Image (spheres, grey):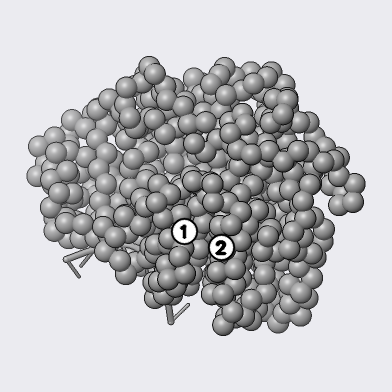
Amino acid sequence: MFTESTRKLARPTRPRYLPPQLRPQNANVVSPDTGAAELTRPRFSRFNLPQPARTTRGSGPRFTNRRNPNWEDEKFDELEVIDDTSEETNETNFDAYEDIPVQASGENIPPPVETFAEIDLGDGLKQNIRKCKYLKPTPIQRHAIPIAVAGRDLMACAQTGSGKTAAFCFPIICGVLKDQLLLACRDGRPVACPLALILAPTRELSCQIHEEAKKFAYRTGVKIVVAYGGKPISQQLRNLEKGVDILVATPGRLVDMIERAKLSLGMIKYLALDEADRMLDMGFEPQIRKIVEKMDMPPPGTRQTMLFSATFPDEIQRLASDFLSDYVFLAVGRVGSSTDLIVQRVELVQEIDKRNHLLDLLRSQKSNGTCIKHALTLVFVETRRGANELERWLSMYGFPAIAIHGDKVQMEREHALRSFKSGATPILVATDVASRGLDIPHVAHVINFDLPKNIDDYVHRIGRTGRAGKYGLATAFFSDKNLPLAKPLTELMKESNQEVPSWLIEYAENSSFSGGGGGGWAKHAAGNFGGYDFRKGIASGNESSYYSSTYNDANAVPAIGGYYVAASANAQTFLGGADFYADPYTLSANADYLVASNANLYPAAPHEYAYSFGSVVASGWD
DNA sequence: TCGGCAC
């Protein structure tokens, strides 16, 4: 077992970009009154709590979006910088993630690095990394980048938002830059021949990756083009003709371009699949197989393939291994790793009551949080039609809501997302089109109006909040339709040290759907939480001979479960200082306000719908 | 079943 604590960590300079999973769990909390760090508090006790003053926002922003005056490009404006206020917090920041588990398996695994400087990424890229304020690699980057730069295939598990886009973009850009020979022999071809292909499951995610990758490749000469449906193909084809080194695409438009003979995959040297488990699920698999195996893509072994996902069920790993050659399996942190920043609530609501229940929830929220400009609420529903209906229903009752789903034309989709992000329409009603990968700042509350069938999707959905070091709230409406989810949901919540309602536990125990839940979670819940190399399962008894590793032993898996406990303990000790009790509605109302103000927020007692709030620790949303 | 993905 390898943990981050085994590595000596250098003191960082400031300002410093702090990726989500590295962000402080406890002591990096500044008291609004004193500006001093509030250190770890004793484990929460409901009846014996300190009483900090309620504070309004505007007191000492902690997380700020800061413009770098030395950097002229607007694209770099949105990067988040955390300004450290004391040496102590520096120390504690690192303590906070010393227990992040890393499991790597495969043969001859390149060891992790501590800094970007240790890797030969090239001057241009390194400069951009600095400009992006990625001063220190995240755990996934520390481990994945050396593996990828060494040319190895990779199957990597890491939560979205943990810096995985950079983890596959840096090695790809670096590889393209170094491959002048390949670039030279490509010249003069009539069809576009990118050297790298990045596939994503939704158009909006492709866009996001493209935007990110462009920053990393700024002024390196590496050409990055994006291709996705819903827009005229002509402009995208023109972009291809102008030259493309790295193509970011959704599957449908990609196939279209290939079949029009405008694009060849014959020179692909790097293939990356983002949200790889989704890309290989039932709906996508044939299309991906077509692209990867039945077009002109070089076979495994002659290209480098990297698969990234937050969840990797066995069956998906099995499919994925067809695309890989002598690959390294890497699991960093835990699946759904942001959940320790998210308070999860489940409410028993019958289908017929859901709309009124939602209205009540939003009303309380509104009456308590009207002054907060950017307290966004993301409501997930099952169907496109349901999204439209709920959008109308909410609008009818005075809540500015907008829907996003696959029935809308691309312009409407993009408008909805923009309108939501800007706060113009602070409620977004979405299907699973918005459940994965999208980085939307300021989502304070995710409401699962309809729960997904699959617990993995639940993990992805609630991961839209609790980002950027802020606490988030996730509320689920559990109806009798969701009985199969009772067990995996209970297990997930327990592992995240959430308060599980007793009725849900009962449902879970009496559930005849013991193994299912539709997804891989129940399987993972045996103690490996998705971070498990399925090859170990089939190589039982033989693993030491085949799966050697420089820093992992074959028995490391249970320790990943151990991290859950560690993370949760952190979350627990962080909490404290309640001054407030509330019924569920008031809770939600205040939760939104408090979350918007970066409050810490937590369940008060087991099996109760009472919650308590800690002091407001920061407010940095303006 | 749904959702996502090209015209």
Q: Specify few, some or many for label 2: CA neighbours under 10 Å numbering under 14, 14-19, or 20 or more.
A: many
Dot 2: element? helix
> Looking at the picture, how far across and down is residue A283, in whole percent?
40, 69
The 10 Å Cα crowd at callout 1, few under 14, some 14 to 19, many 20 or more, is: many
Direction from residue A576 to residue A422 in the image, left or right: left
Q: Along the polypeptide, which appears first: circle 1 or circle 2?
A: 2
Q: Name the chain letter of the residue that bears numbered label 1.
A: A
Residue highlighted by disc 1:
A427
Residue type, numbered disc 2: Leu
Q: Which residue is mark 2?
A: A362
| Location of residue A151 in the rendering, given as x and y in whole percent from the top left corner | 42, 36
Q: Are marks 1 and 2 in contact (CB under 8 Å)?
A: yes
* Residue A119: x %, y % from top left: 47, 24
Look at the image and tell me whether residue A525 can be seen. Answer: no
Q: Nearer the viewer, mark 1 or mark 2?
A: 2
Element type at marker 1? strand
Where on the picture, by quarter, is residue A233?
bottom left
Rendering quarter of residue A88: top right
Q: Residue at x 25, y 43 (%)?
A: A225
